[in-house]
Every structure is written in C-alpha cells, then in structure tokens.
C-alpha cells in the first residue's frame, strides 16, 4: 500500500476511482464513438495495487523454483536452456507423416507429438468387417505395419515421441513397443510420453469401448509396465486441453486436469504403486490460446494449485514431487486451416503465452491443415521458436510478468474459481462420479454456449470469423466430436486366435497384460481385434 500512498496521493495524482471515472468518458478525439467492448474474463480492464492487497508475496508468489512454484519450477527458468519443442504430427497420409517425422528426427529438436484419427483413438481400427474410414486429420493406425511405415528409417532412441491418446493408450504404446522390438530397438532407450487419462473421452460424452472400470485397469497396466521397463517414458500425463477445444474455460481445464490426476494418484496408492514414481515423470498437458495474459495466469495458477493440493492431500512427498511440469499444446481454436500466414501469427502469440507462463514443453501446430504440414512449415515453426527465444527478450529474465497487477490478480482469481470447481467435483465423489452424473459435461456445455453467444454478439472477436470475415467462406468452430458406431469381435472370434485369447485371460491391471498386447501386435493383429480381446478380460 506504500505505493498507493507515495505514488498517487502524496504526489497529488488521481486516485484509482477518480481516474477510472475520468477515463470512462468518451475521448473527444473519438468524435463521440467508442470502440466495441470486448468481453474480458473478469469484466474489468483496469487494475491497481488494491487488486493484489490480499496476496502475500512469500505465501502466494515466492521466488522461481520455490513453493508454491507460481513463478516456475526452476530457479533459472530458461537461462540454462530453452523449452522442449515438439512438432505436431497428425496427417491422415502416413507417407507424408513419415516424411515429417524423419525431418523432425534429423533436426536439432527431435521431438514429435502424435495425434490420431478418431477410430484409432477409440481402438476400433481394423475390426473385421469394418471398412477403412477416411479422416481429415489424425494418424489412421490399425496394425504394427502402420507403425513400421510411419517410423521407417528413423532411429527411435534419438526421437522424443509423444502419444496424445487416451482411450487406446495401452494399445498404441504396445503396438509401438512391438514395432521397436522388430526393428531391434532397445526399448529401454525410448523417450517420450503418453496422455493415458481415461477420463478425457468420457468428459466429452464419447463412448469408450472398454467402459470405465476396465479402462482404468488397462491404463494402470501401461503405467506399471512403463515404470518397470521404460525409464525415460512418462506413462501418465493428464490433460484438459480437449475441453478448451470445444469452448471450455481455463478454469474448467485446470479443475478437470487436477481432479483426474488426484484420482490416479489415489488409485496408485490403492494398487501399492509409489505416487512419487508417477509424479516424477508426470506433466499436465494444457492448451494454450491467443489471450496471452489469461494463458500466462492460468499456467501460474496451475502450478500453485497443484503443489498446494499435493501438500495438503498426501504426506511424505518431497519438494521435487510438488513441482508441476507443464506440456502446452497450441489449441486448434481459433486457428483456421486455410489461413497459414495469419495463423503463423496466432501460433507466435500462443508460443509467447506459453513461454511467459513458464512451461517446460510446447507443441506447435502452425494452423495449417495436417495434409499441408510439410518440412517447410516445420522449419518455419522451429524458426519462430528460435526468434522468440533469442530475439524477443522474454526468455532473458526469469518470470518477467511477476508483480503485474493484472497477472497476479488474474492468477488469484483463477485459483479461487478452480478450487470452487474442485470442491464441487469432490462433493460428487470425485472426477469419475462427476462425469457419470453429467456435471462436467454440463459445465463445459454452458461455457461453450456463452462463448458462442459472445462471438455472435461481437463481444469476443475472432479475426476471420466475426471481424474481417470473408463472406464466401463458412468457418466451423468449436465442433463437438461424435462417437462412430462400431461392433467388436465376440467371444468365439477372440477364442479362435491364441494371442487374443491370451489377452482375454490376462489380469487387466498387471504389467503382464501389456506383454500379451505386445505379443498380439507382433503377430499381426489389428488394434480393433486387440480392443475386442481386452473387453473380454
């Protein structure tokens, strides 16, 4: 408050209230016209020291690398090296995707983040009698032959490979392991991550073929296998970015991710798995949009919330377990596929937001259709990272936004809102019960409808959609995914194949189940056939 006394009143300057009243009057130079009022997250556009008077520096902000990690998990932030750059690979053309992965593997940032077609994500590709489905985006993988084709001529030990998949996480990682074994790759050297959060498809009202209890068991089979055999692979990384893609808020994104992570950590304890083993490898996968201040505040709030939740809920965890690593994914919304140059600007804004937010890894998309994301686009995206990292100056200072009245106030506001949502989720009995009751889906639907209404009214502006729009083109945004129909193999069909029957007779939550899955893929079975066998466990 010393700043207010010395800087405003003692010097004879206006008080905040007087200034706000004065500034709200129409500027004479505007000739009576005012700019459109943009919808802001808090409904305000001016902040002073009064807005952060409840914030205690050591308790709520502290120093970089110190609890509650608001200012980042490392004391040096990016001074000892830049963030990890992961390039998105989601082309429906496997030949084009393979060429892009090869380009990435040969670059000085060999990290690829794979996204999959809906049929592959659900684990139903390659079912007998099911015809192949053309997809606009996402890798369409059915068997180990597709993995072999995708990684042909690539040394996989040198490539950091991310799997953005939930419903069929165990199946896809098993397929990858089978392909690695056939390529004589030492799987102990495999680096990367898999999302593997069973709640993500359920929260979007998607139909998971396995059903919730079995899906959880298979998810932990993958976790157990990875902790024991893949020292450089992270088997659980919860994310809420998919909620943002259909209109959810940053607060809902964090609350969903925290609640999912809490469920897994509690479940790990029940299964006698040391939570610290999972936490030491885990990252939150959070989306990043173009509203820079809000995204920065969100990342800061996520670290603070998670460290406090862990400290209050679990005993015996050291400080290293409380440090939240964040992997940010550039949101597809508001990118428009055929506006590459414009969306490169948006991608730069997303990158700046992620860097100012202190994340550890960033997946970039470039805002072009997956079939057009070639080596030229990949190089341009890499150059944008280099320019931001070396020329913008935002990585030269550790947490340069600290102390901003708006950023600190917004961070605090997000934390309060997220804690309120978490309280409601706990009242329902946890994330599993909240999804079953429809609470999560209902909350996201309300936010989506509000966002669409604001955009229709012109209070939330999106260039190319409701401002500077090409009237000849219709842009479809915030579209919700629809579950495809499918029919799994019956028991007699599974029993006729020994590898599949071995899966059906396995203990679903054990690491041995993963061995059975890998064996089935090694013998040429499709992901749909393997999913059918899992359903009979």
Image: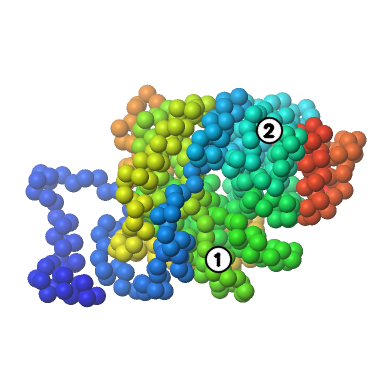
**In x, y percent, where is residue 253?**
50, 54
Whether residue 165 is visible to the viewer of this picture, yes or no, is: no
- Left or right side of 267 for 518: right
The N terminus sits in image quarter: bottom left
The correct choice, above or below, for 305 with respect to 479 in the image is below
Which residue lies at the image location 57% right of the left edge and 32% below the top edge?
Answer: 101
Task: Between label 2 and label 1, give the one nearer the viewer.
Answer: 1
Asked if the residues shown at circle 2 and circle 1 are in contact, with their CB atoms under 8 angstroms apart, the answer is: no
Name the residue carrying label 2.
147
Which residue lies at the image location 78% right of the left edge and 41% below the top edge?
Answer: 518
Which residue lies at the image location 41% right of the left edge and 32% below the top edge?
Answer: 380
In-front residue for pair 508/129: 508
The correct choice, above or below, for 116 with respect to 189 in the image is above
Which residue lies at the image location 16% right of the left edge and 74% below the top edge?
Answer: 6
Name the residue carrying label 1.
320
Per the rendering, the mark at residue 84 is none
What's the image's color scheme?
A: rainbow
């Amino acid at each position: 408050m010393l700043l207010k006394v010395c800087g405003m009143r003692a010097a004879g300057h206006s008080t905040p209230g007087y200034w706000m009243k004065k500034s709200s009057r129409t500027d004479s130079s505007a000739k009576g016209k005012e700019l459109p009022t943009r919808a802001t997250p808090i409904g305000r556009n001016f902040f002073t020291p009064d807005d952060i008077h409840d914030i205690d520096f050591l308790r709520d902000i502290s120093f970089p690398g110190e609890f509650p990690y608001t200012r980042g998990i490392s004391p040096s932030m990016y001074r000892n090296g830049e963030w990890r750059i992961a390039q998105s690979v989601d082309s429906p053309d496997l030949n084009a995707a393979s060429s892009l992965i090869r380009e990435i593997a040969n670059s000085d940032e060999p990290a690829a983040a794979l996204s999959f077609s809906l049929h592959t994500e659900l684990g139903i590709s390659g079912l007998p009698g099911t015809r192949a489905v053309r997809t606009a985006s996402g890798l369409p993988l059915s068997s180990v032959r597709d993995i072999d084709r995708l990684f042909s001529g690539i040394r996989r030990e040198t490539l950091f490979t991310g799997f953005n998949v939930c419903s069929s996480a165990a199946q896809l990682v098993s397929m990858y392991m089978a392909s690695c074994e056939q390529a004589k790759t030492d799987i102990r050297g495999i680096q990367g991550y898999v999302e593997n959060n069973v709640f993500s498809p359920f929260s979007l009202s998607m139909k998971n073929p396995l059903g919730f209890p079995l899906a959880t068991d298979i998810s932990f089979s993958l976790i157990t296998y990875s902790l024991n055999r893949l020292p450089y692979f992270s088997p659980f990384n919860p994310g809420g970015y998919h909620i943002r893609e259909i209109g959810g808020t940053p607060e809902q994104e964090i609350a969903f991710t925290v609640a999912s992570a809490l469920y897994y950590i509690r479940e790990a304890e029940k299964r006698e798995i040391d939570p610290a083993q999972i936490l030491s490898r885990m990252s939150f996968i959070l989306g990043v949009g173009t509203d820079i201040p809000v995204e920065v505040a969100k990342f800061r709030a996520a670290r603070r919330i998670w460290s406090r939740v862990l400290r209050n809920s679990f005993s015996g965890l050291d400080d290293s377990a409380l440090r939240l690593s964040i992997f940010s994914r550039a949101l597809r919304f508001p990118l428009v596929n055929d506006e590459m140059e414009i969306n490169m600007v948006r991608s730069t804004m997303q990158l700046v937001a992620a860097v100012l937010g202190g994340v550890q890894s960033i997946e970039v998309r470039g805002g072009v259709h997956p079939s057009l994301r070639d080596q030229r686009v990949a190089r341009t995206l890499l150059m944008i990272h280099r320019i931001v990292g070396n020329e913008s100056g935002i990585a030269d200072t550790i947490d340069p936004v600290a102390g901003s009245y708006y950023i600190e106030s917004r961070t605090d506001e997000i934390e309060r809102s997220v804690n309120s949502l978490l309280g409601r989720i706990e009242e329902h009995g946890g994330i599993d019960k909240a999804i079953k009751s429809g609470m999560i889906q209902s909350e996201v639907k309300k936010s989506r409808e509000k966002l669409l209404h604001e955009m229709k009214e012109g209070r939330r502006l999106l260039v190319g959609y409701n401002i500077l729009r090409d009237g000849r083109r219709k842009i479809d945004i915030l579209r919700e995914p629809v579950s495809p129909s499918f029919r799994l193999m019956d028991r007699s069909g599974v029993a006729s194949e020994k590898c599949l029957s071995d899966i059906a007779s396995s203990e679903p939550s054990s690491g041995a189940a993963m061995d059975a899955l890998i064996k089935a893929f090694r013998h040429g079975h499709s992901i749909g056939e393997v999913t059918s066998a899992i359903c009979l466990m």
